[in-house]
Structures are given as structure tokens and as C-alpha cells.
Amino acid sequence: MTYDEIVQALRDSTYELQNEGRMVRAGLKAQQDTASIIERYAWLYSDQALDVVREPTDEAGRRVRAAIAQGIIERRTAPQQDRLVTFYAGATVRVDGGEEIPFFTAQAQLLREPDPGRREALGEGVGAVMEAADELQFELQAAVLDVVRGFGYDCYTDFYEALKEVDYGRLQTELVRVAERLRARYRAWVEPRMERCGRAYGECPQAHMGFIRGLPEHDAVFTREGFEPAMRRTFERLGLELFTASTIHLDLEDRPAKNPRASVWVPEAGREVHLLTRPGGGNADYSSFLHEAGHALHFGLTDPAIGWPLANVGRSMAYAELWSFLFERIGHDPVWIAEATGVDEHRAEQIAVDLAGVDLMLFMRYVGKFNAELELYAGDPLDPVRGRRVFTGACDAATGFRYDPRAWQFDRDPGFYSADYLRAWLAEAALERWLRREYGPHWWRTREAGQWLRQRWLEGWLPEAEDMVAGVGEAPWSGDALIERVEGRLAVAA
């Protein structure tokens, strides 16, 4: 095999795998079968292919080698992954003694259910499904660890630090500093909402978090009728053709088996990108669409001429999440809210404060998840008693919610994705501060800002989040811009 043959096969297999995953996620296919796809490329996802790439000195070659390593993990764990995904796609949640609801539908209902008691009942049923999947989760996790050891790493954390070229200890130190600095602001915002659920800080089940996140008190102003005009106006002002680009395909349909968590699938950057959301009504529709639009535009407007590796393979997801966070935060601006919904200035300011509170709540959640993962992999990650204790201990302490220990495996994304999200949180706040200085406080109204973004996206996945921050003269790996933004916004509510 040659290097060029490897790159072409990576391109072809990625295309097939992305579309397979998308079909199941969209509720268009009941059973996932990535194993058969990966087996057709067994020669590619192999130690022999790694030997061909060896130790490349160019960035594209390093991305190819990383893609092969990830592909080896996917190949050797595809049967376990398929069984797990298929289980959840077909699972049902039992509520109130007999009612059965599809697992993903129950998760969507948790975001909208107004009755606190029924939310907790739904959460209990969802937890039971997660517990039923424990053995499948164990099989998957054990297979991943076996592959990582085959790469010469005794520790899962060490492997991903090397693969993503990041120091997780350094990142954790900064995140803990930021979280502690913002804790008082967070408690002042979240405690009254927990009390409305009939629970105190430290005793509130996590089942209420999604409902609180959705800000149902503001749902009425985020209408279905106003959704598309607001989104079209936002991207037209920036000169970004989200709704008309031939490379971007939108799926907004509501299907019972469709995963409610919005997502973007990229069979090939610069050529074919799919944005999936499952509208449920209210602010969540606006926020999730803006978030995923950032991904869709980044990958949809990539220049494929830079070569498949730099267009499609990142060192981590932090750079991609930087853009999705940036667009989601447009929806937190009170001026944008007033224009999008027609509310007056005072109401728009109230909504903006609450969106900042939600953002901080989610930041705390991901700090908790990241802390839990670092502690978990510092010991035996397959010890269920220890794993549940580590998960609930770290997440409870960070958020003030009481986490369900049965979610300890379900609520953990592979490859330290939590760290990628958190790096994007820090980087986006710094970049947004620069955009406000460069193009004005309402930078999202200007085509000049849109053109600057378009030029960045032509580079595909070449830089990292921290590279972008340093490139505009801000401080990478620093949470100061995030602290400044949160304190400035939540101070309005004090």
C-alpha cells in the first residue's frame, strides 16, 4: 500500500461511516452497521498502514497517522459500538407503571416536561435503560483500552494527550480556577431554578437540568414562525449562505427515533455536510440551530483543494467547537434577541442574562465531567463501584445537581471530548472579545466579519483553537475572557 492509497481509502471510508451514523441518528435507519463498512477497509485500519505513514514531519501526514490510529480503535470496537447504538435506538423507557416511550423520545420529553414529578419519573426510567446497557458499555470500554495498550500506552489519558497534543493537567488547573471564580455567580443564578423544581442546591436530580437549560419561561417568545426568518436574517447579514450553499443539507424533521441531540455529520468537508436537529419548540431550537450552524458553515465552506487530511481531520474537536460556540453566543446578545423575537429591550436583557446562566451551568457540568474522567482513568476505569462514585462525586460537586450513578458510562463521551468542549469555551470567549473590538459590539451584523470568518474556514481543520486565539493577539489557554463575559452579563441580574 502507498500513502496516496491510504489517504483515498480514509476519504472513502469516512464518507461511508459518516452517512451510516447519520442515518441512524436521524431516525432513518433502526440498526447501525459500521462493522461491515470498517471490515471492508481492514487493510487500512491496521498496524501495517501505520508503518507506511511512520513518523511524518508534515502536518497532513500527522493527521493521516492520527486518523489511522482512530480508525484502528473504531475497527476493533465496531461490533461493540454497533450493539450499543442499536440497543439505545430500540430501547423504551417505562414510566408511571406501564407507559412505554422510545428512549430518545423520553430524553426529548425531559427537556420540555413542565411537571417536576414526571420529569423525575422520566429520569428514573431513562436511568434504568442506561443501567441495562452497562454490560454493552463495559465490552466497548474494555475493547478500547485493549487497543490503546496495543499502541504502547498503559494509560488512556496519556494516549489522548499524545494524540491531541494537549496537557490535560495544565488545562484542568485553569478550568478549576475559572470555575471557582464564577461559583458564586453560578449559585446565585441556578439555586432559584432548583427551588422551582422543589429541590435544594445539592439535592436537585440531574433530570431537571435539561428543563432548566431550555428556559421554558421564555419559550413563548421563541416562536416556530419566527425561527426561520430570524436565522435567515442572521446569516444573510454576515453574507454566509447557510440556507443556500450546495454543500450544506438541513434536516429539521421530527421523527420518533431521531436523536434529539442536534448534530452535524461531515461525509466530506467542502463537498457534503448534514445538519440534523429535532425541533421541540422554544429557545432550545434557536440555540441548538445556531450552534450546529457554526459547524455546518465551517465544514461546508472549507476549501477541499487544501487536501483531504487538512480539510477533514483535526488534532481534536476543540477548533471545530470554537465556531459552533461562537455562533451560539450570537443568540445570547440582547440586541439579537430583541430583533429575532420582537420583545422589548428590558425583556431581551432578561433573556440574555438567563442564557448566560445556562451557559455557565453547562460549563460547570463539563468541568465536572472532565474532572471525573481524569480521576476515572487514573485508576481502574472498569471498576463499576469506583466509577459510579467518581462520576457522581465530581459532577455533583461541580454543578450542585445530584447525578444518577447509572449514567456513569452513558454520560461520558470518548476521547476526552469534554476537554475539547472546555478548550473551545475558553478560546471562543477570547475570539469573541477580539471580534467585538475589531468589528464592533454587534459584529454579527457586518459582512466584513462574515468575510473574515469565511477566510478562516477555507483552511479547514488546519489550526487549533489556541492557535486561532494567539493569532488575533489574545491569550491562549486562559479563561480570563470567559470570566469577564460571564461576570459582566450576570452582574446585570445581581
Image (cartoon, rainbow, N blue to C red):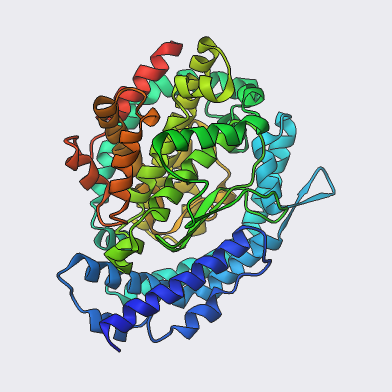
The answer to whether residue 96 is above or below residue 306 is above
Q: What percent of the width, then of the height, locates residue 471?
A: 18, 42
User: From where the camera sits, is residue 358 visible?
Assistant: yes
The answer to whether residue 207 is above or below residue 21 is above
- The quarter of the rendered structure image containing the C terminus is top left
Decide if residue 157 is on the left or right side of residue 271. Answer: left
Observer-nearest of 310 and 380: 310
- The quarter of the rendered structure image containing the N terminus is bottom left
In the picture, residue 427 is in which quadrant?
A: top left
Q: What percent of the width, then of the height, locates residue 25?
A: 60, 59
In the picture, residue 325 is in which quadrant?
A: top left
Residue at coordinates 52% horizontally, 22% vertically from top-left? 339
Residue at coordinates 43% horizontally, 76% vertically from top-left? 12
Observer-nearest of 213 and 472: 472
Residue found farthest to the right? 98
Q: What percent of the width, then of the height, locates residue 264?
A: 50, 54
